[in-house]
Each structure stands twice: as C-alpha cells, then as structure tokens.
DNA sequence: TTATTACATGTAAAATCTTGCATGTCAAAT
DNA sequence: ATTTGACATGCAAGATTTTACATGTAATAA
C-alpha cells in the first residue's frame, strides 16, 4: 500500500489539499509514483477515518487542507523503518525500450528509440525547470533530492538509448 | 495494458511456458515490470483465445510452451510503434528513498538509507551474475541491454544514496 | 525410500488503479 | 458581461494486481 504512505509522506512535508497532492505526485514524485485525484480523494477520506490525517484548514472553493496526526506520523515512521521494502517496479517505457531494439526491424526500432530519446530529454528539461524554481526559491525544497536523482539518471538513459541506436546502425 | 505486451515481447524473443515467463519477469525484466504467475496464466489464456499466442509444444508436468502467432507479432509491433507511450512509473523503493532523509530523525534515516544502499549493491551483484552468465553463453542474449542499463543506473543510485548519507552526517 | 526442491498450472476474493462522468468555485482576461 | 483556465472535489464502472488457496509432477539428495 504505497499510495497511502506516499501521501502521508507528502503531507508530512507540508499540509496539502487533495488537489495539491495530485500535483505533487505529478511534479515532484513523478519518477517514483503516480496517482490521480480519483485515487487520492477516497484515500484521504480513509486516512481521516483511521485518524492518520486531519483537516487543518478550510479555504476557498470548498478546499480542505489536510495534515498528519500523531498516528499518521507514527505510521509513516513505522513503514519507513520497520517494513521490509518491496523492490517491485513498473515502467512501461522501460519495457518498450528493452523490447524495441530486439523485436523491431531496424527502421521501426529507430523510430521507437528516437521517440524515447526525445521523451528523456523532454523530461530532463522539466526536471531542470523544477530545479531552477527550487533554486530561485532559496533551495529549501524537500523535493530537491528527488529531482536531483532524476537529473543524474537522465544522462545515463540518454547514453543507453544512443548506444542502442548506434548498435542499430551497425546492423543496417 | 503493458502486461500483455511485455508477455508478447518475451514470447517473441523465445517461446516459453507460463512458468518460464514468471521467472523472466523476475530476472530479466525486474527493473521494468513485475508480474506473478497468477496474472500470467489467465492472460496467456486470453491471448490464446484472441489468437495472439498458440501452444507450440507440450512437455513434462503438463507444461505448455507458447509462441506468438502472426497476429501476436502484429499486435506487438503496433504497440511498440504506433501507441503513444505512457510515462508513468511506480517504484516503492524510490518513494522510500525520497521520504526517508526528509522525514526521519538522522538515526532512523541512516538505518533506512543504509538498507537501501545494501539493496542497490545486492541488486547490482545479481545483475553482474546475469551478465556473466550471458557472456559465458556467447553474449547472444536479447536481455543483455536491459541488464546493461541496470548496471549503468546502479552506480548513480549508489552515489545518490551516499550523498544523502553524507548530508545526514552534516546535520547530526 | 523419502524428503526436499524446482517445475508447473490454476482459481477466487480482495485490494488497487484507471477512465469517464459530474459538479462547482474563483480569478483574470476579453 | 462572459469566457477561459486553474482550482477543487467527488462517484461509479471496469480493468488490473495482489494475496491466498489449491493441486500435482519430476529430479535430486539424504
């Protein structure tokens, strides 16, 4: 149940509305977890029922800002420290990148890999913008390490894709 | 529906039983997708119903080896070339690594990060063994690129975790 | 010969996630 | 004034995934 703990983690960093959480998943945590608002709102309700989060403010447009309770903090710590991590991953792009060069004719493989390369570069730009925004903000964002890891992995991906493209060239 | 296409991809590389597929997901494709046998067998059945795969051999212990039909090959190509990729990812470990240094007391964070580091190194060893097995086998495995990407990303992860640990040290 | 391990397949219930529908508020620009 | 876009929340149906249960075969080691 990582959604729940990712949400607790985001709320521990800073109280937020369901809408805020949805954007944080897309922005700061996009390379780690995805969740849409239609998952987030019901889960917020359950967490509230279980006493892990509470409404700490109500604002315009019926917005409710949630923060962690003591029980929520305890559950988050328990998960991070005591629960054995699951190493499972799911990445459709990775599946594609592995399959394309092996299974497609060189021309098709080139199309697929070049699209992957564009996506990697586009994602890197997005990360760089986030990093710049954080820097402009004083550098204090708790999400900087996540962005940093993304920026470190990105050139490795790029290099790998370019090598796959080069290997294609050798064959054709 | 990536499960289906990952399965088609694995079968395109080489015909396999459901049991084989289960192991390949764990071994070669572990950094890209996870699937358990209880998903794989029903999906094999559906793929057979739809004419994407067919039984190409039956062996001991009621085993059935499946291979792609022409329709299966066509569907796989269609997915790889024509379908717009989804960039969504899910990695529980990544969520943990991002949250631990921010939300735990330095002592707890150190415990969590050191466990992450051990896991990264353990996974790298596993990848190195697979790479060695492939090399011993003549280097012809279609999974070598996947293993290679894992081996390239691994030191980046290690470096990031070590930097997080060092940053902890500064604070404590 | 018997125990263990790896091979091999399956089903069902429960949990989780996606997709599509639905509603409404507030601020800013036209 | 009104339109657009960002903010904000929610439900329901359907698809996917996990977890637990269930069964049986073949090879190998003790």
Image (cartoon, coloured by chain):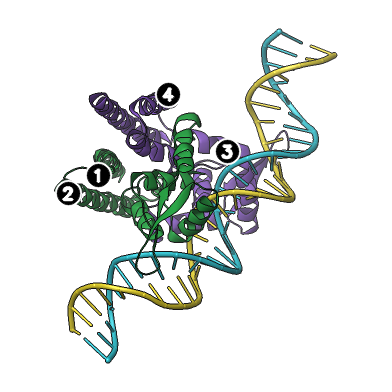
Chain colours: A green, B purple, C yellow, D cyan
Q: Are marks 4 and 3 on the same chain?
A: yes
Distance from Cα at disc 4 to Cα at disc 1: 31 Å
Q: Are marks 2 and 1 in contact (CB under 8 Å)?
A: yes
**Mark in front: 2 vs 4:** 2
Name the spot of residue B98 as percent of width and height, x first: 35, 38
**Mark in front: 3 vs 2:** 2
Position of B46 compared to B6: left or right? right
Distance from Cα at disc 3 to Cα at disc 2: 47 Å
Q: Are marks 4 and 1 in contact (CB under 8 Å)?
A: no
Residue at position x 28%, y 31% in the image: B160
> How many marks overall?
4
- Residue beneath disc 2: A137
Q: Secondary structure at mark 3?
A: helix
- Residue beneath disc 1: A141
* Dot 4 or dot 3, earlier in sequence: 3
Mark 1 belongs to which subunit?
A
Quadrant of the rendered image containing residue D1: bottom left
Residue A89 visible within the image = no
Residue at position x 52%, y 40% in the image: B14
Pointer 1: residues within 10 angstroms few (<14), some, or many (20+)? few
Pointer 3: residues within 10 angstroms few (<14), some, or many (20+)? many
Distance from Cα at disc 4 to Cα at disc 3: 21 Å
Name the spot of residue D20 as percent of width and height, x first: 69, 39
Name the spot of residue C3 as percent of width and height, x first: 76, 16
Pointer 4: residues within 10 angstroms few (<14), some, or many (20+)? few
Distance from Cα at disc 2 to Cα at disc 1: 8 Å
Residue B122: which numbered mark, if any?
Answer: 4
| Placement of A118 over or under C21, stated as above or below | above
Q: Are marks 2 and 4 in contact (CB under 8 Å)?
A: no
Q: Nearer the viewer, residue B157 or B109?
A: B109
**Mark in front: 4 vs 1:** 1
Position of A21 compared to A47: left or right? left
């Amino acid at each position: 149940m990582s959604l729940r703990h990712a949400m607790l983690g985001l709320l521990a960093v800073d109280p937020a509305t369901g809408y805020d959480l949805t954007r944080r998943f897309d922005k700061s945590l996009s390379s780690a977890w995805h969740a849409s608002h239609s998952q987030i709102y019901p889960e917020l309700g359950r967490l509230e029922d279980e006493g892990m989060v509470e409404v700490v403010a109500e604002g315009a447009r019926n917005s409710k800002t949630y923060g962690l309770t003591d029980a929520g903090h305890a559950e988050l710590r328990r998960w991070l420290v005591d629960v054995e991590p699951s190493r499972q991953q799911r990445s459709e792009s990775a599946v594609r990148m592995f399959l394309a060069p092996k299974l497609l004719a060189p021309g098709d493989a080139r199309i697929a890999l070049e699209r992957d390369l564009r996506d990697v570069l586009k994602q890197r730009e997005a990360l760089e913008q986030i990093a710049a925004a954080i820097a402009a903000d004083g550098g204090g964002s708790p999400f900087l390490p996540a962005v940093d890891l993304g920026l470190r992995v990105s050139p490795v991906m790029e290099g790998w894709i370019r090598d796959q493209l080069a290997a294609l060239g050798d064959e054709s």
